[in-house]
Amino acid sequence: MAEQRELKSQFFCDLAAMDAEQRARYRQVTQHMRAATPVIEELSDGYALRFGMDSSLCLIVAEFMTLERLCCPFLDLTLEV
């Protein structure tokens, strides 16, 4: 567990972590989320994005988080429904 915490504390983005198909999907998902005009709230330990209740958007956000974790494993991402 200590090793996992050590890796998490390092700040690095692995831009090669996604293949071309994943990068293309990441762009689509990100555009979809931006178009949904989230409310962005600054927190003491990061940011919260609030979206309207749309079940398809919930799946998009979950997919975004999955892809984001590939290149940025140091981020703590949480989805609350």
Image (cartoon, rainbow, N blue to C red):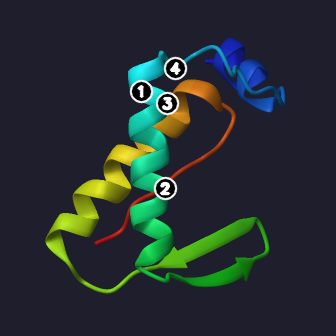
Q: Is residue 80 left or right of residue 30?
A: left
The dot on residue 23 is 3
The dot on residue 56 is none
Residue placed at 54% from the left, 75% from the top?
49
Kind of residue at disc 3: Arg
Q: CA distance from mark 1 to mark 2?
A: 12 Å
The answer to whether marks 3 and 4 mark residues whose Cβ atoms lie closer than 8 Å is yes
Residue placed at 33% from the left, 45% from the top?
63
Q: CA distance from mark 3 to mark 2?
A: 10 Å
Q: Which residue is mark 2?
A: 30
Give the percent coordinates (x, y) of residue 13: 75, 27
Which mark sits nearer the N-terminus, 1 or 2?
1
The answer to whether marks 1 and 4 mark residues whose Cβ atoms lie closer than 8 Å is yes
Label 1 environment density (alpha carbons within 10 Å; few <14, some 14–19, many ≥20): few
Q: Which residue is mark 1?
A: 22
Q: Quadrant of the N terminus?
A: top right
Looking at the rendered structure, the number of numbered marks drawn on it comes to 4
Q: Which residue is mark 4?
A: 18
The answer to whether marks 3 and 1 mark residues whose Cβ atoms lie closer than 8 Å is yes
Q: Secondary structure at mark 4?
A: loop
Residue placed at 76% from the left, 65% from the top?
45
Nearest the camera: 61 or 18?
18
